[in-house]
Image (spheres, grey):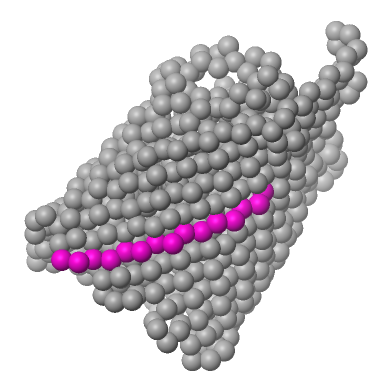
């Protein structure tokens, strides 16, 4: 997807070509001179290609992938790293809404965002610790004029969606934005046992309040409150043959309910041309209630997963002479309750409970030195301290094979602490524009870290009491960007190599316990490239390619040797093309083609996804206040899977979806 090319500045607002969105960057260089592989997805992109979940984004961005148990619960993987987010409190790839991290599996539908930024690779000075990368979503700011919009959508699977958003100026310096919506769908599953077509369906609503106030000193205050509720069925695990045809023979629909409540407060102020302050504080409460149909395992199985988080950051940045700098502090406290039940009585039954607590504080900073006209050297350092605990852990097991038995186990509170210094170094080359061309290149090294913790779903105290080790990574990245100053075209290419030790992986041991194991050594290497070209004022063409080879070098767990095997859920290659065409006034045509390479299903499956192609298209007509659009998602009806179990059951992605949207602006 296109990203607007910008000139470097400490604080800048870029003016993008027609059809692209203005992007404001605070307290750091603009997107063109950011020394990290990034993809910016504007609100227009999300509407044009119907990106309404994190999974939709992951399939259309280079070297970003995902796994999910239902369409509304994606867990992201960047360059092969990630996937274990629902097994413990550690995040490989944080997902932020207005600067506040929220578990991706609880995020559900995305709505009323001004843009989403995907940052690949470890991040040391972006607030929260990011081992693999980061996804940051920004909600729309309130406008300074009274107005609103209504949007209605109907599509395949009896999917109905309605949204309203409105801006209310309170005075010359304060305004409020209200967004609310709801969605219901039967889903895309035909359950032949129950004679129903709604066992994979869902219904829910979402809303947001956002207040923007600009004070007399030039400070900008943003307060936002986000709420999402989603109730759905869980009739997704089936044999590959049935799942491929979206057919189920399960005896019940299961449960998949998610919700989050998120509050964010942000303050931005430019004290003078050499000093900028950014403060973010907030919290999120998420809940996930999940149970499989009894027939999947011939057992009642599922969990509830409440998570509570609170934290924030204070960041200062500035410049003086040949030096510029950025530094601050980040802190967060997380608590997660993790009960799990697997009951196939009288043969076997297991119930575990656990409470996980994590508190971390990080000090971070970087210093940029312009030691020559076009050169900049940037050393950085992050010091991360983490305190983790496991409490209220209990386990009960019973059965009648080979004889009747009943076992109870519990643990006293377990605690551990870890402090890790994480250095980084970047060398940047940014010559003065030559004619109409601007270029930027960088070479960087980053040390990354995932803290240790405990596996809450183990059945035996002897294994649960042993924490899994810290993960470390050493990542080298080289990138180059070249673009036309008018925004007519741009190209970008990034190569990377990550060398990993004690990599945390969700796995099952020989006793059948679901634990976090550690791969002694592993690696991820590859590249991503993207570009856009406007041959005409009414036509823009875009392309991307991503190549990743992520594998375990040394990993033996549960009696299985995974050494040399590719990490699950990550295609070795993906590439795509898209086009945005305005053939006449008020008309827009969007089309994209994406090919994803072969993968092994996450978390543990011998079943492979063959390469598949996704084709999306939309045609939209706009009048003064009205707009109508016809869209197609996965037009080729490609059949592929997003999750796999060792027993052979899989989850299939959604089939072809067709629909229309009707909107009114006032």
Q: Check if residue 221 falls in the magenta segment.
A: no
Left or right relative to 287: residue 400: right
Residue 180 against residue 577 in the figure, above or below:
below
Q: Quadrant of residue 507?
A: top right
In the picture, the quarter occupied by the N terminus is bottom left
Q: Quadrant of the C terminus?
A: bottom right
Q: Residue at x 39, y 62 (%)?
A: 315
Residue 235 against residue 592 in the figure, above or below: above
The extreme top residue here reads 402
Per the rendered image, the range of residues in magenta is 307-321
270, above or below 187, in the image: below
What residue appears at the point 37 percent right and 51 percent down from the top-left corner? 364
- Name the foreground residue: 187 vs 572: 572
Asked if one can make out residue 258 in the rendered structure from this viewpoint, the answer is yes
Q: Is 318 in the magenta?
A: yes
- The residue closer to the viewer here, 658 or 570, is 570
Report how many numbered discs are placed on residues in the image: 0
Q: Residue at x 68, y 19 (%)?
A: 462
Residue plotted at (35% across, 57% down)? 327
Does 206 sit left or right of 406 as displayed?
Answer: left
Q: Main secondary structure of the magenta part?
A: strand
Q: Locate residue 262, reporting x and y percent.
A: 62, 61
Residue 202 rendering spot, x and y as whole percentages:
73, 53
Residue 264 x %, y %: 56, 65
Say which of 87 and 587 sits in front: 87
Left or right of 401, for residue 59? left
Picture quadrant of residue 457: top right
Residue 496 relative to residue 75: left or right: left
Residue 531 x, y percent position in the rendering: 29, 54
Look at the picture and state if 163 lies above or below 577.
Answer: below
Instruction: Tell me if I can see residue 583 in this picture.
Output: no
């Amino acid at each position: 997807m296109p990203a607007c090319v910008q000139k470097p500045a400490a604080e800048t607002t870029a003016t993008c070509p027609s059809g692209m969105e203005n992007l404001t960057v605070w307290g750091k260089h603009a997107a063109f001179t950011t020394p990290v592989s990034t993809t910016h997805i504007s609100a227009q992109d999300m509407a044009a290609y119907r990106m309404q979940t994190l999974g939709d984004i992951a399939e259309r961005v280079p070297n970003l992938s995902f796994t999910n148990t239902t369409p509304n619960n994606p867990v992201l993987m960047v360059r092969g790293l990630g996937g274990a987010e629902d097994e413990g409190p550690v995040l490989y790839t944080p997902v932020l809404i207005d600067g506040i991290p929220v578990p991706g599996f609880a995020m559900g539908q995305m709505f009323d965002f001004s843009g989403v930024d995907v940052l690949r690779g470890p991040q040391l000075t972006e607030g929260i610790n990011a081992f693999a990368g980061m996804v940051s979503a920004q909600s729309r700011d309130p406008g300074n004029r009274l107005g609103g919009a209504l949007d209605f959508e109907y599509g395949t699977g009896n999917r109905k969606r309605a949204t309203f958003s409105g801006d209310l100026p309170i005075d010359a310096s304060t305004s409020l934005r209200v967004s609310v919506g709801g969605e219901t769908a039967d889903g895309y599953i035909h359950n032949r046992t129950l004679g129903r077509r709604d066992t994979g369906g869902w219904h829910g609503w979402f809303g947001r309040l956002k207040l923007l106030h600009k004070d007399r000193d030039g400070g900008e205050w943003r307060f936002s409150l986000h709420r999402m509720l989603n109730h759905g069925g869980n009739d997704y695990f089936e044999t590959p043959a049935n799942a491929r045809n979206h057919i189920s023979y399960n005896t019940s629909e299961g449960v998949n309910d998610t919700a989050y409540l998120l509050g964010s407060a942000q303050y931005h102020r430019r004290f003078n041309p050499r000093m900028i302050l950014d403060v973010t504080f907030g919290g999120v409460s998420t809940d996930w209630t999940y149970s499989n149909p009894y027939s999947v395992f011939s057992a009642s199985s599922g969990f509830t997963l409440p998570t509570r988080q609170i934290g924030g950051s204070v960041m200062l940045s500035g410049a003086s002479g040949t030096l510029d700098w950025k530094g601050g502090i980040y802190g967060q406290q997380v608590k997660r309750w993790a009960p799990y039940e697997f009951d196939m009585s009288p043969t076997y039954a297991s119930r575990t409970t656990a409470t996980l607590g994590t508190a971390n504080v990080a000090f971070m900073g970087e210093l940029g030195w312009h030691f020559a006209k076009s050169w900049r050297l940037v050393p950085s350092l992050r010091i991360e301290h983490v305190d983790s605990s496991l409490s209220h852990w209990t386990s009960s097991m019973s059965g009648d094979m080979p004889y009747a038995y009943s076992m109870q186990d519990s643990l006293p509170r377990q605690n551990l602490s870890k402090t890790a210094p994480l250095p980084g170094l970047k060398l940047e080359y940014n010559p003065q524009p030559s004619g109409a061309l601007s270029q930027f290149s960088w070479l960087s090294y980053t040390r990354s870290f995932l803290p240790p913790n405990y596996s809450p779903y183990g059945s035996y105290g002897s294994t649960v009491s042993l924490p899994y080790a810290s993960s470390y990574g050493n990542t080298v990245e080289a990138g180059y960007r070249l673009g036309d100053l008018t925004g007519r075209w741009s190209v970008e290419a990034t190569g990377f190599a990550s060398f990993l030790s004690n990599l945390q992986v969700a796995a099952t041991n020989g006793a059948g316990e679901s634990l976090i194991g550690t791969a002694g050594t592993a690696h991820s290497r590859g590249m991503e490239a993207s570009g856009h070209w406007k041959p005409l004022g009414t036509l823009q063409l875009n392309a991307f390619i991503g190549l990743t080879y992520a594998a375990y070098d040394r990993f033996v767990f549960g009696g299985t040797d995974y050494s040399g095997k590719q990490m699950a859920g990550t295609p070795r290659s993906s590439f795509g093309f898209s086009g945005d065409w305005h053939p006449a006034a008020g008309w827009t045509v969007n089309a994209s083609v994406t090919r994803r390479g072969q993968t092994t299903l996450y978390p543990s499956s011998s079943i492979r996804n063959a390469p598949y192609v996704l084709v999306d298209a939309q045609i939209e007509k706009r009048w003064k206040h009205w707009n109508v659009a016809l869209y197609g998602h996965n037009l080729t009806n490609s059949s592929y899977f997003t999750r796999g179990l060792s027993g052979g059951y899989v989850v299939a992605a959604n089939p072809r979806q067709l629909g229309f949207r009707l909107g009114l602006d006032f």
